[in-house]
Image: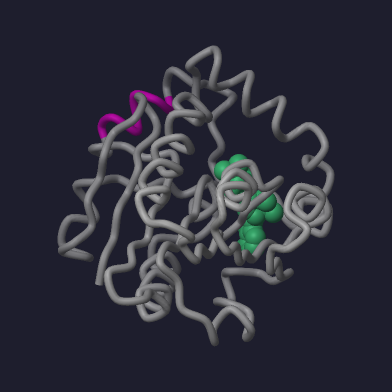
Amino acid sequence: MLDTRGFDLWADGYDASVGLSDEKNTYPFAGYKKVLGNIFRKIMEKQNAVVLDIGFGTGTLTSKLYEYGCTVYGQDFSQKMIESAMEKMPGAHLYQGDFSQGLVEPLNRQSYDFIVATYSLHHLTDGQKIAFLRTLLDRLKVGGRILIGDIAFATREELEKCRLAAGEEWDEEEIYFVADEWKDVFLSLYFEPVSHCADILTLAP
Ligand SMILES: C[S@@+](CC[C@H](N)C(=O)[O-])C[C@H]1O[C@@H](n2cnc3c(N)ncnc32)[C@H](O)[C@@H]1O
């Protein structure tokens, strides 16, 4: 699992390496642009939304939202990622903190129209995901939604198929969403497939 330092080192080449995998339609980032684009469009349905981005990275999604009038909050543990995102959105409220320990205090005092997490929650175990998502649900404004874009599969069989095809590229340390294993966890959790290895997940209170 990449730690803060790993993500610091990845920050400069991140956008290019993600783009390459997406263009080739291969694991891990097949569907990446569509995932971010669809989430962007869902958020733009509300004018001037207040958005919290969990693991915002270089700010690819939230800097677009910022440009279009959203108020942006975010938490990431990589100083280099934060610097890169800050350049694109100097007025955003970006905090450094490990989300496996929950939200940093200033973010816990706000509420949000949307909480987004793209390609970040797979760094948590399923147990940690559930606990964290419960705390995030409490931070939503009335009518708010959590939108997750991530590597995900309909079934464990689909995941295994992708693992076989990916060979050495497969990351054993990441823990991906499997839709049919989550259907009883949050009744309002909805999976929308985007590519052979990516879904958008929507969760409302
Ligand atoms: C693969 S990148 C995704 C970045 C961006 N959301 C995107 O869609 O391109 C994962 C991001 O999550 C951050 N991250 C991973 N684990 C984290 C943790 N435990 N706490 C805070 N940030 C974390 C990394 O620093 C990195 O910026």
> Is residue 162 within the magenta segment?
yes
Asked whether 173 or 121 is in front, the reply is 121
Our reading of the magenta stretch's main secondary structure is: helix
Q: Relative to 183, is 47 on the left or the right?
A: right
Coordinates of residue 106 in the picture (x, y in percent): 63, 83
> Is residue 142 within the magenta segment?
no
Residue 22 can be seen, yes or no: yes
Picture mark count: 0
**Quarter holding the C terminus?**
bottom left
Check the image and report above or below for 46 versus 173: below
Residue at 70% in and 66% down = 94
Which residues fall within the magenta stretch?
Answer: 157-163
Residue at 62% in and 64% down = 74
The residue at the far top in this view is 24
Coordinates of residue 96 in the picture (x, y in percent): 73, 69
Q: Relative to 117, is 182 on the left or the right?
A: left
Asked whether 110 or 154 is in front, the reply is 110
Residue at 18% in and 62% down = 188
**Color scheme of the displayed model:** one colour
Asked whether 87 or 176 is in front, the reply is 87
Coordinates of residue 28 in the picture (x, y in percent): 52, 30
Coordinates of residue 75 in the picture (x, y in percent): 64, 66
Residue 6 can be seen, yes or no: no
Check the image and report above or below for 71 versus 173: below
Residue at 55% in and 15% down = 23
